[in-house]
Each structure stands twice: as C-alpha cells, then as structure tokens.
Image: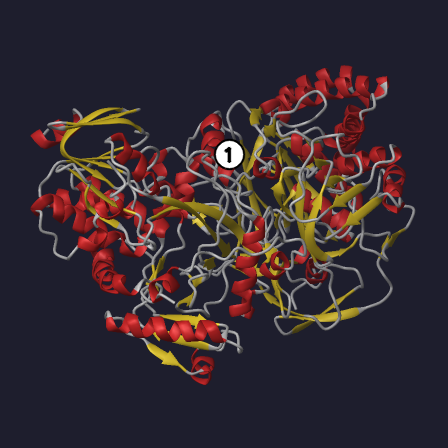
Amino acid sequence: MANPVFTPTNANSDAPVIVIGAGPAGLACAQELVAGNRRVVLIDDNIQPGGQYFRQLPPGYSTAPRARLMRDKARYDDLARVLDSPLLTHLPRTTAWSFPQPGTVAHAGPLGSGRIAGSAVVIATGAQERSMPFPGWTLPGVISAGGCLNLAKAHGLVPEGRVVVAGNGPLVLVAAATMAAAGARVTTVAEAQQSRRLAGAALSGVVAAPGILAKAAQYRAQILRAGAAWKTGWMVSRAHGDETLREVSIAPVGPDGRPDLTRERTIPADLLVLGYGLMPGSDAARLLGCRMELRPDLGGLVPVRGPDLQTSTAGVYAVGDGAGIGGVEVALIEGRLAAHAILGTPAPKQLAHRYRTLDRFRRALNSAYVLPTPLRAADDDTIICRCEELRLRDLKADGNAASGSLNTLKTSSRLGMGRCQGRNCLHTAAGLLGLSPETMVETMPRFRPPLRPVPLARLAADRDAGPAREPDEIILSEAKD
Amino acid sequence: MPQPKMRFIPGVVPNAGTLSFSFEGNEIPARPGETVASALMRAGVPVLRRTRIENQPRGYFCGMGICWECAVFVEGTGVVRSCGEPARPGMVVRLAEAEV
Amino acid sequence: MNTAKARTAAGQADTIIVGGGIFGLFCAMTLAEAGKSVILLDKGRIWAEASAVNAGSLGVQNKLPALIPYTLWSWDIWNTLSDRLGADLGLRRNGGYKIAMTEDEAARLGRVVSEQIDYGLDAQRLSPAALRAQAPWIAPDCMAATWSPQDGYASPTRVGPALRRKVESLGVRIVEGAAVAAVENGPDIRVLTTAGDFHGTELAITAGAWSATIAAMLGVKIPISLDVNMVSVTEPARPTIECIVTHARGILTLKQVANGSCLIGGGWQGIGSIGDSRKDIDHDQLVHNLRLAMRVIPGLAPLNILRSWAGYEGVTPDSYPYLGRLPGHDNVYLAACARGGFTLGPLMGTLLGELILTDRPSRPITIFDPARFSNAAA
C-alpha cells in the first residue's frame, strides 16, 4: 500500500474511507458510510471509542443503574454497533501521525504502523480547551473541564475534597453539574460572563433549540441544589499551594479583562476545574494544508468548508468540534452529512433542516460567550508554555518578541516546542503578547509531523514505507574509490 | 502515603480483580483496565512528573492527550500519558524523564 | 543621526549584502567592525532558512579532508563567539564519534580518517571494545568508530537572534521582506527589491541556495543544486549522548542538545524545490532515517518524536563552498553553499568580509573560486 495514488471522492469507492477520531462525529459518519455499504477505517488514539462526549469506563467496569454517568447510553450503544460491522476496521490507541499524500494516512500504534490509502479522509478529531494562565495554574489539583469530565466518565472517579469550578462558557455548567451529580463537594462556581449576556444567548437559543437550553437550566438547578455559591462576572485570579493545590483566589472581572484584585477572595480548595472555553483542534487540517479561516462564531481557527463539509483539499472532509465548536448534536449531524456527501447520496431533508437550525444556534451561542475583552490573569511570573517552562517575562524579554511573528518567537524562545506541540500555549501567548488574531493566524508555525508525539520505534516500524534512497555520500566521493 | 484525593463514584463498579505496580518505589494497587493516572490519584499521588528546569510538580490536567502534563516513565516502554496507559501487573513507573 | 546611518536609512551603503543567513551575518559583522556601512537584505525574515533549520552540528570529522583546516579555523571563531555576542549559544565541544556499521563502511572510515588526519584532524581509531567502554549506548554490533575531541554543536535558534543583535548594534541596517527583483551593476550597484531600491559600491551575495538566481540577474551562471534535508527531534531525555555522532557514509548525524532532546539528521531528502516553495517531509525517507538512528543507538527507540521538518541547502557540484568574486564583476562577491554551512559559516562570512575590505583574506580561498565551473558560462 505504499505510495498509492490518491483519487478524490467517489472515483475509487473500493478504497475505504478513513475516519480519524471515534467521537460522536466520527462514529456517526462511520455508521452512515457502512449503511451505504462503504468500507471504513476508523483511527482513534484513545483506548476506547466514544470521544470526549461518549467517554467509556475501562473494560470490565460497570455502573449501578442509579449512577448517572452515561446520560446518553442508549445513543452511544446505537452508534457503537457500527464497530461490529465487517465493513469497519477500528484501530484504537493508534495515532494518525501524518498524511504522506492527501488521501493517505500514516498511522502508528501498539497494534502496528503503516499507511492506508483512502477514497476519502474525514477529520473528526474534536475540540481542545482554551488556556487562561494565571499564577499557580500548573499546580497538581488544577485541571481542565475536559479533564474533570474524563475523571468521572473515563475513570469513574470523583474528588474527595472541595471543588471550585471557574471559567467561561457551557463547560462550566457541565463540569460543575457532573461533579455535583457524582457526589463531589462543589463549593463555588465562577462564570466570567455577566448574567445579562448569558440571558441574551439563552433567548436566541430558546427559539432555535429548546432542548439544549432546558438541559442547561437542569444543570444549573443541580449545581445550586448541591449548595454551591454561583457567581457570574467572576474569574479565577490565582491558585495557591506548594506540591498541590490548597486555595483558590477568585475576583470580579474588571473592565480590562483582568481580575479586580481589590475584591479578591481566597477560598480553600482541593480541586480547581477550569473551563475557559473550547476551540477547534485544527492541527490535522493544518498539517494537510487545508485553507484555514478565523471564525469567532465557530470558536476560532477552522478549515474552510463547502456545503458538503469538504475542506479546500479535495476528498478531505472535516466534521464535528474540530471544524467548529457545536457540541454533540452538531457533531452527529455533520458526521452523517459528510457521509452522504462521500457516498454521493442526498441527505434526508429533515437532517439538513435540523442542521441549519442547530448551526444557527451554535453560532449565536459561540458569539454570546465571546467576551468583549479577553480574560487575562497572567502576571509576568506566570508560566505560559508548560512544557518548556516559559514565563510571560521570558517571552516578553525574548529577542524576537518584537518581531510580531509567533513562528519567529517560537524558534528563539522554544515556545511550543515541547510534548504538547504548541497546543496549550501558542494561542495563549499570542493573546498575551498583544498579537491580533489575524497576525496570530498568519504567523502560526507550520504544523510538523507527527500529529501527536509518537515513539521513534513506532514510526520506524512503518510496514508500508517505500525503499530507501540514501543521501549522497560526499566523503566517499572525496576518497575517490 | 498522603490522604487519598480521588475515589470511585458511588455506583461505579470497577473490575473485581486487583493488580499492583510500583511508582517511585511505592506499591500502588490498581484494578484491571484502570489507567496508571487513575490508580495513582486514588492512591493519593497527585504529582505525576517534575519539570526538567525548575523541578516543579505537575499532575493530571487535560485528561485527553493534549497537554502531556500527566506523563510518566514506564520501564521498558518509555514516557507515556498516564491518563491513557492501562496499569499492568508489576510495571515499574517513575516520574517522567525519558532515557536513551 | 550620524552620516553613515543617514545614508543606510536612505538605502545607500558601502556594501549591500543579499541573504541574511550565517554567511551574510558574519560578512556584515566583519565589514561593520571595520567601519563600513552595510545594508543586509533578505527576501523574508533573516535567519529563516538553512542557518536556522539545520540540526546544529559543528562537526569536523564529517567534513571533506581538504575542508578540515577551514573547519578548524571556523571553530576558532565559534570558540569565542559566546563572549563576542554576549549570549548563550548552546555551544558544546564535547567531541564526537564517527561510526561504521558494516565492513565496507569500516574500511572507508579508516581511509578517510587517515586523509583527514593529514589535513589536521585530531582523531583516533577506537576498537569495538574501547567504543563499548566509552559509549555503551552505541549499538554493540558497530563495526568501527573514530573519536575526535574537535566535534561539537551549537543551537541554531540561539545563534541567529544573538548575531542579529550584534550586527544591528554595529549599525548594519537589516531589511526584511526585500525580495530582489533585479540587480544593476555599472558603475555602482543598484538592487531593486520588493522593499525598495538600494545602492552600494559593492554587492555581496550570501543567499545560499538562492544565490544562483541572484547571480543570474547579473548574467552569471553559477551551478547550485538543492538539497531538502530532513531533521527530527525527540522529547527531552536524561543526558546520555554527550557528543555528536556521525556516520562513515555521512548519512546520519545525531546529538543530544542542552535541553535533553535528541536531534536526528543526516541529509535524508524531503520533498520540494525553490520553485514550488515546498519543504515537505518525505515519509519514506524519514522512516529510513529513523531506522538508521535506532540501529546505531538502540536506546532511542522509546523516545517520542515531537517534530520532523525539512529545510533547503544549496549544494555545489564538488561540495566545496563558493567564495570569491563573481566571474566578470570586480565589485560583486559571492559566498554560499558549504555542505555543513553552519560549521563553516563564521569563517566563510568573515573571509568574504576580509576579501571585500582588503582583497587579501587571511586564509587561501582559491579552491572556492566561483568561476571554477564557469567554462560553460558566457
């Protein structure tokens, strides 16, 4: 299968469709493709399928009926049936690490490494969280909202001590409600957005998607029932502790987006959950060279897509949160719509209609949560790049800080050169250094393979690598033999 | 051992079996299928790696393979994300530092 | 404002340098220290191509025998560069191993090292047992190795910004985003770029792989081919490999740098050309590069690879750099395209500066004459 020639969509239906990511969007897409009798290879770097939303407990775990971890178990079970189809090959714990050609995926994992030539590629790799650095945010005991949900959903765990949840956006609600439902002591919830802006979002949402709003109200009631203090217009300003988290300081959001430290309050905490928003995980599309655009209503940097959800690279589709933040409902529909586009079959009318409605709603919601002034709690001493241990001071003092180029700054400061490959820090650093969003996008370093860190031996184990062409032997030519 | 900081959610029934591995020389009990991060957090071990330059403690953060803050070193395997690595009987785990 | 500064601000200088890599910056530094006014042009940002994206080896053992003296002279500059620039350059001179994995390679290693020693290399042959005792992390089936205390490395990402600060402090005007559209010569030099026109008494071309294009604007054909070299970097690991490792056939360079990351190179070719601006990984060759690295140092196997990339390197037909006057032009100079230009760059840039200043560079440069392939050219 080495170096196959890629033919765009439909031309070569014998080759499988390669779906990257086994979350809601990827599973829905795979299900529809299999229903259309198309072969599918589903690549996912997690142990179990489901993505973040349908996270599964480890194999061999079970839940008593009263445990409300899997709210949507029935829906997941329906989706997961596709995994048993003879038309589908599931590669778990496998990294799609690069694209030797637009239609070919190089993959590596404990089950083996090789390449697969697809008739189409579907990027369904999901979202990642936005960082909002502040003094003390690297302490153990400070975790992200996604990390918090996975504690419960993927590990079946709940913290024993006091939990503070802080952030901006729907994740705050979801994380706090999940913790409360799991039996955690949620003492304080701090949402940075003022309640009247949230009300505006709610109003636009009631029209478009009453179900989602009802769920939000339910979450909020659950949190208040648990006895948590609920503060809107407040943000986290600092975390305190030596080896682990001990206390959290919160403060009202000032007009400059900074915490108003004159009104700061410090509360004891054993776990601090941060939910400062999601952004599309754009790395696969960037590595593929898809044309990208900055879309605040889709949560940030996304691949440009046509109505069929195809990117600017022929035969490459992008669906779900990685192509624009929209949550599980949008992801499920986009997965199906892309499958129909690949199969060349028309999507059912009600599916297309529901998509239009949801798409409008998620744009309104994303826009409503965009703060007039970005939040900023980092001081000069705050770590911005966790891997390379770079503080804001280091970045400001770098010889290339004034270049106005994220890529230039990266090369001299080592910003984004660690194991997170820049995912945690590049966006944040750009904002803190005063780069405009447009400049950030223009000067964002090119994404280099592998898409995730992969052990050398697994890359070397590529069973489909073509023959070696050794570099010219210059020393030999000199030796004249 | 410090106080446990994480426990199973009431109603979650883990795999009935047990196994153990070592972390920095301490024996850590785990359930089959459970990740290294999960077992360590239940055992009250929040510090999973120390940073290279400042020797600062780091722990579980994103839980989804983005941040690598929960990286640990597993003998015979290398540096892995503890939140995505199932515990195996007898595995020898240390604070993350890769070795050639 | 002094007059020189006012002149460069107006686009006039004694010397216009085209190409802001390591050759150009050292040439600028040499000229400016001697009191010349200099404008340094780059089509993009300076320090963005081969000088920036190479793996940082400062190898002596991996150089052609005739280049050994030049490499050692360049090391004389490297040795004091941190002090001169007032910056930590990630410079280490911990020596290096050059290894052979087959009998053929072992024979070649032996032949080449004899010749290199004749040219001044300090190196010794190691028995397999001695190698294992000194460097147990090298594969036990390594057939032969040489050791030289003269090899080392520096961090390209640190050297660039430090050099820039230095030349700017000397009054050199750096103009970025100045892609050259045309060059006129007679009697003075006029360089027309996307960032304006620049006038000088002399022109220095230090544009690496792009130098042939600039020379062609003056009607001179200089053969330069393009390599697209790949480099990979691992996550940081406990310091183990305290020196650089090179290969008898020049197909591997390997080092563990200050932060513990291992850099793996060796000239394996990626995909791209100057025309299409591509600098892409060739996945097949990347895999072979990594396999070879793992075969030589098995302990690399579990290390996570964080990035692989490709960068351009201009190459001359005989692998010797160009350094001298452009054929047919008394006031146009060229220095470009050393295989291992990061190692040789400080010397090459300095010699070019000396040539422009005094016409008598401190080292012989005849073997580098840019006219040596120009029989065919008009």
Chain to which mark 1 belongs = A
Could you tell whether C85 is left or right of A394 in the image?
A: left
Quick one: which residue is furthest to the right in this view? A65
Rendered residue at 39%/39% (across/down): A408
Residue C138's x, y, as percent? 49, 73
Label 1 Cα neighbours within 10 Å, binned few <14 / some 14-19 / many ≥20: few
The answer to whether residue A412 of the structure is visible from this angle is no
Residue B72's x, y, as percent? 61, 62
Residue A265's x, y, as percent? 54, 39
Rendered residue at 33%/54% (across/down): C319
Residue closer to the observer: A435 or C265: C265
Residue closer to the observer: C214 or A266: C214
Instruction: Give the SS element for disc 1.
Output: helix
Residue at mark 1: A263
The answer to whether residue A136 of the structure is visible from this angle is yes
Quick one: which residue is furthest to the bottom in this view? C129
Residue closer to the observer: A415 or C184: C184
Location of the N terminus of chain B by quadrant is: bottom right
* Residue C340 quadrant: bottom left
* Three-letter residue code for mark 1: Arg
Relative to C374, residue A217 above or below:
above
